[in-house]
Amino acid sequence: MRIRGEVTINAPIDAAWAHLADIDSHVDWMADAESITFTSAARTGVGTAFECVTKVGPLRTTDKMTVTEWDDGRRIGVAHSGIVVGSGVFELAAVNERVSRLSWTEDLRFPWFVGGVVSAFAARPVLKRIWMGNLRRFKGITEGHNR
């Protein structure tokens, strides 16, 4: 299952990157992320590993993530392991010197024992709505509206 969303941010790319690169603060704008616990000494860069307690409605899981890509100011890629597996990528681009765009793509697979492709089909619109809300909150924080 692939989900992609993007948001235009009225802030320079450096400001957006400062918030995006602070993985620990993702719980401030991700409604489905309850907590992040680093399992590696690193908190930035390739190899950074963490567990994210994720909650969607009554469902809760611990998503294990490892940063697989880190292009300063531009891109963070993660591998998901746990019940749901796959990958995610955040990409930042400058629209101009005062405006940036953040895109978020997730490719996830649900295991057969939780319904596989049927669960993914049912979850897709729910996750898309949650993640678009997350992008709007990221925009608000980056623009200084939600601190």
Image: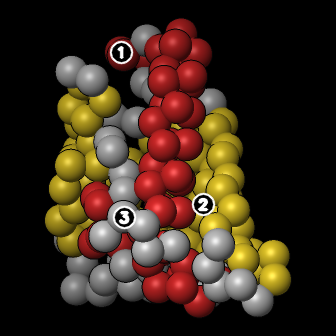
Residue 12 tag number: none
Residue 89 tag number: 2
Given the image, on which type of amino acid does mark 2 rest?
Val
Q: Cα distance, mark 1 to mark 3?
A: 39 Å
Let me know if residue 48 appears in the view.
yes
User: Residue visible at 32% across and 42% down?
Assistant: 32
Q: Cα distance, mark 2 to mark 3?
A: 24 Å
Is residue 81 rendered to the left or right of residue 40? right
The one nearer the camera, 114 or 13, is 13
Please identify, in this view, whether the residue under mark 2 or under mark 3 is nearer the observer: 3
Considering only order in the chain, which callout, 3 or 2, is on the residue closer to the N terminus?
2
Work out which quarter of the rendered image holds the N terminus and state it: top right
Residue 113 tag number: 1
Q: Mark 1–mark 2 contact, CB under 8 Å?
A: no
Given the image, on which type of amino acid does mark 1 rest?
Phe
Q: Which residue position is annotated with label 3?
A: 146
